[in-house]
Image: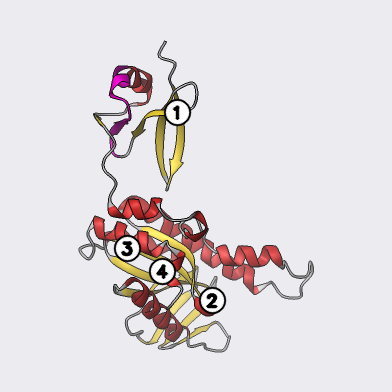
Amino acid sequence: MSGLRVVPTWRHGQERLYVCLTDGRNVAWYDREAGRVNLLSEERRDDVLETLRPFLTGPVTIGPPPVPTPAELARLALHPDDDLAPNRPGEALLVALDRDPGPARRLRPDPRRRALTAEQTVGDALDRLDGAGWHALHSVPLPGGDRLHHLLIGPGGLFCVHSLYARKQKVLVADPMITLGRRDPKPLLRRLRADADRASYALTAEVRPLLALTEPADIALIAPPREVRILRDRDLDTLSRLGGVLKPADVEALHAMARDRNTWVRV
């Protein structure tokens, strides 16, 4: 008996199978997506492979762990309190509702809950792009109490994404105004472009504005928006087909910069 056991874990949405000694120390891990077994001890090579045999799928490469990239080193050095990557979609609203849930009985629904539904719906759609080489950050705090609903980074570039609850409502777009149903128009596109400009300044890279509408009944463009992409939440997966703007190393480097809370303190 080798005395080794396999412990499955999830890191950044990817499964890893760690091979551990009885005292809990790791001697190897299997990255199924990369098809690689990373050995920390060459002496345990045969025991590790025998222990992992029931879990291996397809051909694998075997060797020591790869040298971490500069982006990975920056992430490892980041203090947990400054890391924005763990933020859930709608994180700021979840915290606000937890602190002040409001009255138990209301004549009208709490608008924060509709906004939360929009951010969670859009955020979940953006997170599903992870397998296509994209990274999404949520509730990115800005000075003055502002925040970006979502920041998307991937092969097709960077997008500042604003979620808007529009279920069963007609959306009228007359740049910079957005009108939902019978409500008064608001200059939402002006704010979205300003947020994208602040993100561009912080990351020293072009960030494009994107308005994501959740379940609108219809979208009417009176004055086509300048520089702003508008998508329904169900169409966000089309972003996975964009490419040719950033190389994988650039995506990782920008993600490492963007997830650091300190990047945003002076924008």
Mark 2 or mark 3: whose residue is earlier in sequence: 2
Residue tagged 1:
25
Q: Which one is closest to the eye, mark 2 or mark 3?
A: 3
Q: Dot 2, how many residues are within 10 Å of its Cα: few (below 14), some (14-19), or many (20+)?
A: some
Kind of residue indicated by mark 3: Leu
Residue tagged 2:
169
Q: Dot 4, how many residues are within 10 Å of its Cα: few (below 14), some (14-19), or many (20+)?
A: some
Label disc, if present, on residue 263 of the rendered structure? 4
Mark 3 or mark 4: whose residue is earlier in sequence: 3
Give the distance between the C-alpha atoms of the residues marked 3 and 4, in whole angstroms: 11 Å
Magenta range is 34-46
Give the image location of residue 209, x and y in percent: 37, 76
Q: Secondary structure at mark 2?
A: loop
Question: Left of 240 or right of it: where is 151?
Answer: right
Q: Which one is closest to the eye, mark 3 or mark 4?
A: 4
Mark 1 or mark 2: whose residue is earlier in sequence: 1
Kind of residue indicated by mark 4: Thr
Mark 4 or mark 2: whose residue is earlier in sequence: 2
Residue tagged 3:
254
Rendered position, 30 above or below 96: above
Q: Secondary structure at mark 4?
A: helix
Give the image location of residue 225, x and y in percent: 36, 84
Q: Is residue 148 magenta?
A: no
Rendered position, 158 above or below 180: above
